[in-house]
Amino acid sequence: MTAPTRRPVRTSAGDPRVRQSRPPRRRPQAPPLPRPATYLLLLLAVGALTVIGLVMVLSASSVQALRVHGSSWYFFNRQLAWVAIGTAAMVVTSRVDYRLWRRLALPLLGLSVVLMGLVLVPGLGIEVSGSSRWLGHGPLRMQPSELAKLGLLLFGADLLSRRSHLVGEWRETLRPLVGIYAVLAVLLIAQPDLGTTLVCGCIVVGLLFLAGTPLPSMGGLVVGAGFATLLLARIEPYRWQRMVSFIDPFADASNTGYQAAQGRVALASGGLSGLGLGASRAKWGFLPAAHTDFIFAIIGEELGLAGALAVLSLFAGVAYLGVRTALRAPDRFGLLLAGGVTAWVVGQAAINMGAVVGLLPITGVPLPFVSSGGSSLVPLMAAIGMVLNITRHGRRPAGLRAGTVPRRPSGS
């Protein structure tokens, strides 16, 4: 008996009994977006200011470095090391999602307050020219008030973004932010450091303005801050002398108006084109703090009006790009963070250059990215990195959203 023959089973694609194993369809993804123009331009402007700062620190400090430390490169080498650290911090913050930094607002602010309190402890704080602002030993020093600027900025941006629906309630927004600023101001005035107090005030005012705080409340705050500044200057004789002498420094050019007068002489000596790089006469012991607070005077002397306007244009570019980033931020925290960093840079630069040219009293504020000093440079470059990250999270062009691929025209 023969075994029955089996019919061959058809395995065609149309047979419903047979499952065809197909590779899973991949979801189309958008090509990686190039860095926006704002990112590149802001990076270029900050890089140009930093390079100008390195060159001018070498030129302005060479005489003092040779006389005190035996090498004309002493302050330049230190500044170069700080630039490397600041660049590393900027790279890190530009790659980390800016929203994650809001978690560090309170810890960073608390650490700043503790360190600023330690500055006032005898034996711990380092006193220079009558001010106790530094912690550390030897060349390894840090200024906690510079870290406080970043902490105040993150705290204020986080607070005002979470309570955006309560912007008209001054108890919920204005009072806590101004209260934290008042604590920092008391510690800063005790050092004393009126300049950093004013810069922190610029950050607070910028944040409140961007958050939509009612103008009457803003006006009252600004008037009250101005009155408090005049009162603090009046109760300290040396502050009041600085406040008065900036109007006419040549009236007491050998005493209270000496630094302001020498700064104006340096600027006037530069003329339109300057004396030439390295040819400054003010750095030969005539102008105090030539490579720190008054480096803008050396820029005007060696590079002339053209060089001074170039630096001013770079700061104007940073201001424009910062505002543009804030307006294109994807959320309220990004808007406040970018706007607060812009207020920080612009406010500090205006206070510094205003003191050098004689429009404002001398407060001892460094020129951002240009003056010598790592305590100011590193936190500021870290903050710029956060702004760079916001530019990469900004509004994307239509057709390049996540999960879509731009279609090619038919026939291509």
Image (tube, helix red, strand yellow):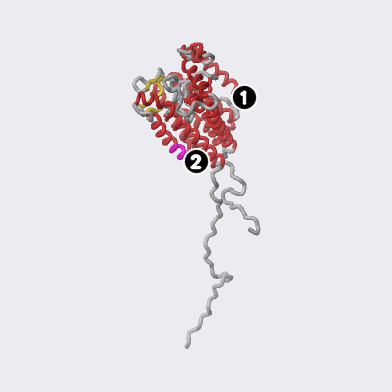
Question: Is residue 78 something one can see in this rendering?
Answer: yes
Q: Earlier in the sequence, mark 2 or mark 1?
A: 2
Point 54% across, 59% down: residue: 25
- Magenta part, dominant SS: helix
Would you say 123 lies left or right of 275 here?
Answer: left
Callout 2–callout 1 Cβ contact below 8 Å: no
* Residue 243 % position (x, y): 51, 15
Give above or below for 88 relative to 144.
below
Residue occupied by mark 1: 215
> What is the crowding at mark 1: few (fewer than 14 residues within 10 Å), some, or many (at least 20)?
few
Residue plotted at (49% across, 41% down): 97
Q: Is residue 393 above or below residue 139?
A: below
Three-letter amino acid code at the position of disc 2: Asp
Circle 2 — which element? loop
Q: Secondary structure at mark 1?
A: helix
Q: Using the rendered view, name the quadrant where residue 122 is placed.
A: top left
How many marks on residues?
2
Q: Is residue 49 magenta?
A: no
State whether residue 182 appears in this view: no
Seen from the viewer's position, the closer of residues 345 and 174 is 345
Mark 2 → mark 1, Cα distance in angstroms: 32 Å
Which residue range is magenta in the image? Answer: 87-94
In the image, residue 301 lies at what x, y percent? Answer: 50, 24
The structure residue drawn at horizontal position 48% and vertical position 84%, both measured from the top left corner, is 3
Look at label 1 and name its amino acid.
Leu
Q: Position of residue 213 (x, y in %)?
A: 60, 27
Q: Is residue 89 magenta?
A: yes
**Which x, y percent locates residue 81?**
40, 34
Residue closer to the observer: 244 or 3:
244
Residue to which mark 2 is pinned: 97
- The quarter of the rendered structure image containing the C terminus is bottom right
| Mark 2 neighbour class, 10 Å CA radius: few under 14, some 14 to 19, many 20 or more | some
